Amino acid sequence: MAKLIDVSDLNIYYGDFLAVDSVNMTIEPRAVTALIGPSGCGKSTFLRSLNRMHEVIPGARVEGKVVMDGQDLYDKDVDPVAVRQHIGMVFQRPNPFPTMSIYENVAAGVRLNAKRMKKSDMDELVESSLRGANLWNEVKDRLDKPGMGLSGGQQQRLCIARAIAIRPSVLLMDEPCSALDPISTLAVEDLIGELKNEYTIVIVTHNMQQAARVSDQTGFFNLSGVGKPGQLVEMDSTSTIFSNPSQKATEDYISGRFG
Amino acid sequence: MTTTTGKSPREVLAAVDQPLSKAALPGWTPWALLAASVLVAVAVLLPGGTSIAAVAVLTAIVHLVLTGAVSRAKEGPRKAKDRVVTALVTIAFLLAMVPLVSVVWTVVSNGAARFDATFFTWSMQGVLGEGGGGLHAIWGTILVTLIATLISVPVGLLTAVYLVEYGGKSTLARAITFLVDVMTGIPSIVAGLFVAALFVILVGPGTKLGIMGSIALSVLMIPVVVRSTEEMLKLVPNDLREAAYALGVPKWRTIIKVVLRTSISGIATGITLAVARVAGETAPLLVTVGTTVATNFNPFEGRMATLPVYAYYSYTQPGVPPQPGIDRAWTAALVLIILVMALNLAARMISRFFSPKAGR
Amino acid sequence: MSTPTQQPTRDPGPGGRGTLATGTTRKGDAVFKGTSTGAGVLILLVLAGVAAFLIGQSIPALTASPEDLPEGQTVTAYVWPLLFGTVLAAIIALLVATPIAVGIGLFISHFAPRRAAQTLGYLVDLLAAVPSIVYGIWGAVVLSAWLVPIYQWLERNAGFLPFFDGPALPSGRTMLTAGLVLAVMILPIITALSRDVFLQTPRLHEEAALALGATRWEMIRYAVIPYGRSGVVSAAMLGLGRALGETMAVALVLSGARIITFDLIGAANPLTIAANIALAFPESSGLTTNTLIASGLALFIITFLVNFAARWIVSRSGAKA
């Protein structure tokens, strides 16, 4: 299921403003890739460009290639909606649908697309997704209760269950723990460790310890100067980035000298 | 900012440097003063014969003066001003309640006479003098309003969707927003004239049809629906749209199944209030639908009676003797008020009981 | 590419996705976007239609020679006294309603007990729910009777003013009564709008004033009112727009004529454009109809300008805040 993504010369714009400048990156399958860097350096923007969520913002556009399975996701024949069915996303703040129950939230990806599915298949899909998100045991007795009634950490895992219920190849996570307390954060981090056996995972995080704990590869983004676009400074295995980075800026950031 | 001219610095300081506890009037003072004011007003007015209105007016004046004087003597001028203003705004509120109570009381007491089974089962066909009813007008109001709603809701809803979800800051979206504002201010009689002028060209002079009334009411209703729906759609957090997009849901399905689904109770409330607003409109129906004595279920053929127009003609041309006609006018007004108030109440119920319990 | 499924247990994914290539989703999006854009454009067309038909149907009256028109006057001469009545009635309504509405707005936003405020606000909103025909009959029957003694008193004691010249009409169905009914009708909209601006006063400004030792009134005087002033002005303008176009209340209260007089309590009362249309249109034909439509066009333009000014004030103050 998991897939490799190859990014080449990707420029990301908001209108005329170049936000991220010529990124080249290979994202390995069945691994966790962490993106770190100071605020506003474009790592979230880059993440959103991987499943074409970036262009939801009016005026936003992208130049360059994002290739998955030999197919450029920005090819003009490609439907951005279909891309998002293959590359799931989890957001900074948990965002379950307020009008839906826990069950309906997990089933949302299928139901909102008006796909027909037998009740037993749907039950099975919901259960396996909730189990996959380590949430099944906590909610199995109240699947018909509103998703908004869960705690923040549970809501976030519900959102992860919702994302993996459409069986994506890749899972993007945009600071998934920044709105959570430490215990919930730990639960989500454990979950990420398990999910990488099946999915390609890309996670944006502000928390360097988190990047060190969960990721196999780490990319460091930084602004090339005030008012200039963000860029990928370096990318390597997590242990290398945190012990022996090749760039001075990376070392400064990791040792807490700025950011 | 305060007027400190003509005071020496010492005086200013003395004014600023005040002790923490000062003489204050006890909490029941306003009520005691009110009672005293009523007594004074009655005592002054009773010898010359009086009315409730006169007593109320004099009470208000005496109360203001007494409050100001007592508070000034005991608490100083600043506190006194505060108390007088409090009394003033309370009086303003009570003043506004006078017409409300009076209207409701007048309509209920006058309308009760003919608020009977006959009124709801008879039309005015072949009725002279006593008897007769407003069934034809009730049906007319229901039909005309219903068709207006069927026209306005899709147009208004879709326009709001366009403005919030698609239009962005485009020229077209700004033009529509502006014109919706303009439409909100169209006098209802002008909406009626527009439809009349339109049908003069389409059908011929002097045409009066139920559908014309519905179109005229739509012109008044659409901007209200657009505005309220727009507000509701804007309240839907963007997170939810992104969550749906990220699941690979196309935009149109996201709008229908997530955005509209989340805001449906607010939209329903807005639509109900819009219906309530146009259901009581008289002027546009007067020039487009006219009135008739029999029940007419066909909006494309012939005139139709509606409650407001029926009340208008029953009151202005009651016939001979006038009393039965005037009674019917009051009852029609009563039925109309009940209808409109019920719609308002329904709107409130919808927003209270059907909104998603989102504790974010 | 094929179905992205390598797990034997869960084949073809939920609903079996196909490739990344463009499919039916774009068609659905195009249709839905097209429909909603069409609805918006329809509104443009309707408003263009309102203007076009009113102008089109006015032209015969505007171009006809005066002898053929009602009263043997040009359209301008015909509309002028009606315009006078319209503006007079609306101004009376505005002068009466605005101070009371501001008072009620303050009462609900800052003086009434917190728990009661919402209910009290709802009571004022109920005033807006009463249909205009009901206000009309109420004004003609109840309010005018109440006002007769006051009019007589005014005639005796303030008769030197042109407004109260008299002789006071014994039925009480005068211009002032009509203006007061309009005041009641526009009260809820001005109240609701000014209440909303007062409630939006930044908490910080209010607390700053209170922390300086201001009484509640001083806090309102120096924090709430300056903040809400432009909002109140635009609320009053919107109320004025309503009052200008209100038809039935005036038509029922006044037995007016097309005259110009400042006497508010006398027997001869100027009619308004809207009321004149309501009274004359049902029985009209030919050029009379055209003349009435021309007067409606004039009303449309005036209310448009007033509403436009109100929005402009809002947007200007909005940019400043």
Image (cartoon, helix red, strand yellow):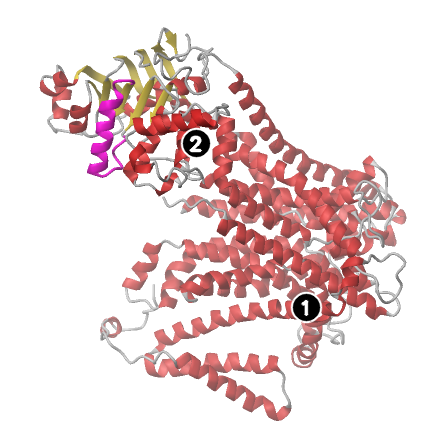
Point 39% across, 67% down: residue: C217
Tell me if residue A205 can be seen: no
Q: Position of residue B66 (x, y in %)?
A: 44, 83
> Within the magenta stretch, is there residue C75?
no
Could you tell me which chain the residue with mark 1 belongs to?
B
Choose top left, top right, bottom left or bottom right for residue A202. top left
Q: Position of residue A188 (x, y in %)?
A: 25, 31
Q: CA distance from mark 2 to mark 1?
A: 49 Å
Position of B167 relative to B222 (above/below): above
Secondary structure of the residue carrying tag 2 is: helix
Going by the numbered disc 1, the residue's amino acid type is Val
Q: Say which residue label 2 marks.
A: B241
Q: Which mark is residue B176?
A: none
Q: Say which residue label 1 marks.
A: B108
Position of A223 relative to C272 (above/below): above
> Within the magenta stretch, is there residue A186?
yes
Point 45% across, 48% down: residue: C317
Residue sitting at the far front: A120
